Amino acid sequence: MRKIYLYITLIFSLFASFTFAAPRLTVVAVVDGMTAENLTLLRPYWQQGGLRTLSEEAFQTTVTYPHLVYGGDETTATLMTGVTPDRHGYSMDTYFLRRDRNTHPMLEDATTHGIGTPLHLSPRALLAQTITDRMRLNYPNAKIYAVGITPQTSILLAGHTANACCWIEPESQQWVATAAYSEGLTTAAFEQNKSNRIATLAARQWTPRMDILTYSAPTPQEKKKGFAYTVSDVLLRSPEANTLVIELTLAIQQTEKLGTDATPDLIMLQLNTLSPEAETDQIASAEQEDMYLRLNQDLGFLMEQLNRRIGRENYQILVVGRPVLGTSAQTLSDIHMPVQLFNADRAAALTGTYLMALYGHERWVDGAYGQSIYLNRTLIEQKRLSLETIQRQVANFLMDFEGVQIAMPGHEAFHYPVLGATLNKRFTGDVVFMLQPGWRLMQDEKKAVDHVIDDNPASPLLFWTGTLRPMPQGQLDATDVADLIFK
């Protein structure tokens, strides 16, 4: 009896190790603007394809964020690292530098040069381990690549330790990269550049793939004339951008033989559902619906090819949306919740005038960015004034502004859970404020800093794996997504 028990235990252990073994290839796709509502709306249109397969076979849930969502890559960084901006350091796409009183890309790195691009970018500013870094620590010989549409998203997906990452440069119509990674521009990307593959697709016309009246939400203008674009004019917000990402992904898989040996490999993708005229993540036009229909087709092609090349039991794919535009201001206005604008630059100018009245005609404010006011600390020290006193005066002054819910000295903001989780200590201003619901933050008269004005926006997550795996129950926090891959 004891021998039988031991045999059963051994068989179960072998089965469990086989069942839950790491797949040979993991594909992680972050999809800009994808919402659960849109997936539900369009499911009847998908007779087949990647999104159809995922909707039937994948583990599905929604993801929420424990920090403020601006619609930039702060959500990407949280998804990739499993921690919030106060820990991973990527609080907004750009930051205010006191030295020159200008904004700079968060991933700007003068010590790193671009390959095919004048941009100097690297993951150095990212302070936490990413999915790729964890994969590298677990499997030092893993082959890890990132393929994206825009530079900062692509680099965040690549983390610190990818072999290479690349993205689309719309002007040159080439794949470009950063020298921050050991392989630079991948062989597959180099070959596609030689063949002018991006230019070939960019020369196409993008028109509706169905009769315009069969779409669920064509605009009045589309009902009259449909839509038509030369892809090169809207490349990064066209279906061809997703097609290019999928094509290069498959080329890298073939060239680098990803998923063909016992060491797990990883490839990270940026995809997009936002069309050129989109003002919201929700489908409000036929062209945006067309983006989903083409994405379904592209993801289906990716899965078909991986099934054929390495077998469906040897890979897994995680697809997660990322809030970019949220609900449109017009939609909120239509339900009698008009969005009002708060101009941070104007608030900084008025704050400067206020301090002049108190302390004399000097430049007391260096500037404003995001939810921060930056005081002229050098001047305050020269005048031997109390920084803490001035911070408190400015916070009280801002509390009288219409739209400001709360204002406080910068160091106190970290005591507020959601706000504190949103801020990067290194770039937080001397005074921090939060706006009331229904207010949108503007940096100047034309540029909105936060596009997502929804409270606690949620993103869909679909996780398909060819092997049996335990899955969590209910909604996920964005900080839990990275753990799914390693469980």
Image: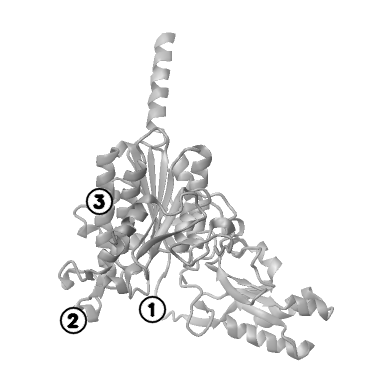
- Circle 1: residue type: Ile
Evaluate if marks 2 and 1 touch, with contact meaning CB atoms under 8 Å apart: no
Residue 224: numbered disc: 2
The residue sitting at the right extreme is: 384
Evaluate if marks 1 and 3 touch, with contact meaning CB atoms under 8 Å apart: no
Helix, strand or loop at label 1? It is: loop
Label 1 packing within 10 angstroms: few (<14), some (14-19), many (20+): few
Label 2 packing within 10 angstroms: few (<14), some (14-19), many (20+): few
As measured in the structure, the alpha-carbon distance from the residue carrying label 2 to the one carrying label 1 is 27 Å
Q: Residue at x 37, y 34 (%)?
A: 261
Looking at the image, residue 481 sits to the left or right of residue 199; the answer is right
Identify whether 320 is placed above or below 354. above
Of the numbered discs 1 and 3, the one sitting upstream in the chain is: 3
- Residue 416 coordinates in the image, percent (x, y): 64, 64
The residue identified by callout 3 is: 301
Total tally of numbered discs in the picture:
3
Residue 484: numbered disc: none
- Circle 2: residue type: Lys
- Residue 417 coordinates in the image, percent (x, y): 61, 61
Q: Taking the image as drawn, is residue 32 in sight?
A: no
The residue sitting at the front extreme is: 194
- Residue 46 coordinates in the image, percent (x, y): 21, 56
Looking at the image, residue 151 sits to the left or right of residue 429; the answer is left
Residue 335: numbered disc: 1
Q: Residue at x 52, y 50 (%)?
A: 130
Helix, strand or loop at label 2? It is: helix
As measured in the structure, the alpha-carbon distance from the residue carrying label 1 to the one carrying label 3 is 40 Å
Q: Residue at x 20, y 52 (%)?
A: 48
Q: Taking the image as drawn, is residue 470 in sight?
A: yes
Between 180 and 162, the one lying in front of the other is: 180
Label 3 packing within 10 angstroms: few (<14), some (14-19), many (20+): some
